[in-house]
Image (tube, helix red, strand yellow):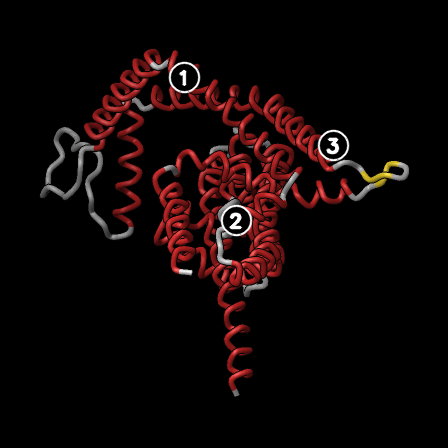
Amino acid sequence: MFARRYAFVLLWLAVLGVIFFAAEILAPFIGAVLIAYLLAPLVNRIARLRLGKKSVPRWLATVAVLLVLVGLVFLFFYFSLPRIGKEIGKLARDGEKLLGSLTTERINQYARDTEDWLREKGIPVQIAAAEVGESGPPRPGIDIRVAVKQSLAEIKEALRERLVELLSVGPRFAANAFRKIFMAFLILMVAAFLLIDPVRPLRFLESLFPPKYRPVFAEFLEQADQGLAGVVRGQVLICLVNGLLTFIGLYFVFGIKFAVMLSILAAVMSLVPIFGSILSSIPIVAIAITNGLGTGFGVLGWIVGIHLLEANFLNPKIMGTAARIHPALVVFALVAGEHFYGIVGALFAVPVAVILIRVFTMYQKRAMAWHEEGT
């Protein structure tokens, strides 16, 4: 008995050591598990279909789903990458034009307008350089012309250094691109194996526990699956809805520049529930204001509508209900995760909260059962 327990302890220490020291190596396998987790319901549904007297083979359902996924990703990049390239080029040209328009006269005019506005508010701060013949006691402030010139010089120097770095990393970029393609293929291959035969990996995990604890582990997996499935798929659904609605508003309704990039930003940030959408709204509204205050307020109203839909319907219903936790706990988990681990913590806050709540609930029921048996 002692030797068996000793062997289990050593086995778990080995597993934890692999997780700790080989975290980067495990990253593609974690990605494969996530993809398999997202696609498992669809594969299961297709595998239950019948072709004549037989069901669809699971390997065929897996291959079909993965081919559709790869096709959709390819179409997305095929149509979006040229547009993103044009938007990046336009952004660079607009930035260069903006820097070129910052003449000394225009800077001084902006500074004087700001001074007048601050003076009306009772704040006598000097921003523009003192004019020739100006008398009176000196006012606290800065010379905006000197500050802008120094900033422009620093920006040009930084761009020059970055350009040299880009020219020197060309071969490394090609090698890195090949590595990314290989890793993507590896992730899809592992995900396919997990989808075709999901039972064998679970049996291996179950074998890591002593026999008397395996029913507890099986119950935990069942409880965690019921909560995590909805949370993970809910986050992806919110991401897609937010990105689609943002693109419709920016491109078709308001005609905002850089609509594709901003929509992708909104979609990615939506993976962090509630707060991600708020943070992504700042650059969207800022760029919309360049088309006029009316357009800026219109885009702000559109974004607020999306946020209200997400905060009052999508997040509480899709995430809170699927995880069977109160929406207030969802917000608390997000705040705590962001506080301790930043954006990554906010991204995984709700799934971790679901697991903790499921573990607590499971052991609470067992403790109550033991107490009733004891009395």
Residue at label 3? 60
Density class for disc 3 (Cα within 10 Å; few <14, some 14-19, many ≥20) is some
CA gap between label 1 and label 3 equals 36 Å
Residue 332 drawn at (x, y percent):
44, 61
Name the residue type under label 2: Leu
Residue 175 drawn at (x, y percent):
42, 16
In the displayed structure image, the side of residue 356 where residue 190 appears, left or right: right
Outermost residue toward the bottom in this view: 375
**Label whose residue precedes the other's in the sequence (1 or 2):** 1
Name the quadrant of the N terminus. Answer: bottom left
Density class for disc 2 (Cα within 10 Å; few <14, some 14-19, many ≥20) is few
Q: Nearer the viewer, mark 1 or mark 2?
A: 2
Name the residue type under label 3: Leu
Q: Of helix, strand and loop, which one carries label 2? A: helix
- Residue 205's disc is 2
Q: Nearer the viewer, mark 2 or mark 3?
A: 2
The answer, for residue 241, to whether it is visible in the render is no
Density class for disc 1 (Cα within 10 Å; few <14, some 14-19, many ≥20) is few
Q: Nearer the viewer, mark 1 or mark 3?
A: 3
Residue at label 1? 173
The answer, for residue 210, to whether it is visible in the render is yes
- Looking at the picture, tell me which residue is in the foreground, 40 or 166: 40
Residue 260 drawn at (x, y percent):
56, 30
CA gap between label 1 and label 2 equals 38 Å
In the displayed structure image, the side of residue 6 where residue 181 appears, left or right: right
- Residue 286's disc is none
Residue 120 lies, with reference to residue 322, above or below; the image says above
Residue drawn where x is 39% and y is 11% of the image: 171
